[in-house]
Amino acid sequence: QVQLVESGGGLVQAGGSLRLSCTASGRTFSSYAKGWFRQAPGKEREFVAAISWSGANTYYADSVKGRFTISRDNAKNTVYLQMNSLKPEDTAVYYCNAGEGKVPGDYWGQGTQVTVSS
């Protein structure tokens, strides 16, 4: 069974940092694009960041550009999201995603809660 499992969420004060991880099991996603999405209460799920299969290309939502960094380690089948200078508006459930060539693709993680207090 294919699974994407996120970890690293939690409660942090504004200005703080968190690092999310998403590890895949059941198959190898080294040739897949990967990304992070988030959903705040009462809002639609939105794109946060994406990375190409090789890691050579990265993409960010304007709201996180300069604060968040996406990276991947294909040997560990893991994608990361380093989040710095966190703001209360970053509070959401963060989801990992994998897709062939682009995201969003067919594979989603279960989500990890990030709460930023003011």
Image (cartoon, rainbow, N blue to C red):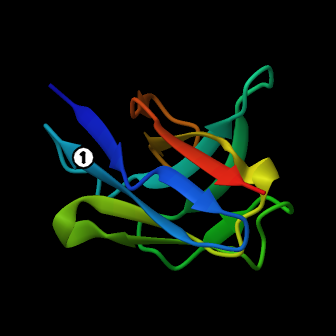
Q: Quadrant of residue 87?
A: bottom right
Q: Residue 11 location in percent, x, y?
A: 54, 52
Q: Is residue 79 above or below residue 29?
A: below
- The residue at which mark 1 appears reads as 24
Which residue is more in the foreground, 3 or 106?
Answer: 3
On the picture, is 87 further left or further right than 102? Answer: right
Label 1 neighbour load within 10 Å: few <14, some 14-19, many 20+: many
The C terminus is located in which quarter? bottom right
Which residue is more in the foreground, 91 or 56?
Answer: 91
For residue 102, say whether it is visible: no
Q: Is residue 26 above or below residue 22?
A: above
Q: Residue visible at 45% across and 44% down?
A: 100
Q: Residue 80 location in percent, x, y?
A: 42, 65
Q: Residue visible at 24% across and 46% down?
A: 24
The N terminus is located in which quarter? top left
On the picture, is 79 further left or further right than 89? Answer: left
Which residue is more in the foreground, 113 or 5?
Answer: 113
Q: Residue visible at 73% across and 52% down?
A: 90
Q: Amino acid at mark 1?
A: Ala
Secondary structure beneath dot 1 equals: strand
Q: Residue 99 location in percent, x, y?
A: 46, 42
Residue at the farthest top position: 42
Total marks shown come to 1
Q: Residue 74 location in percent, x, y?
A: 26, 68
Q: Residue visible at 19% across and 66% down?
A: 76
For residue 116, say whether it is visible: yes
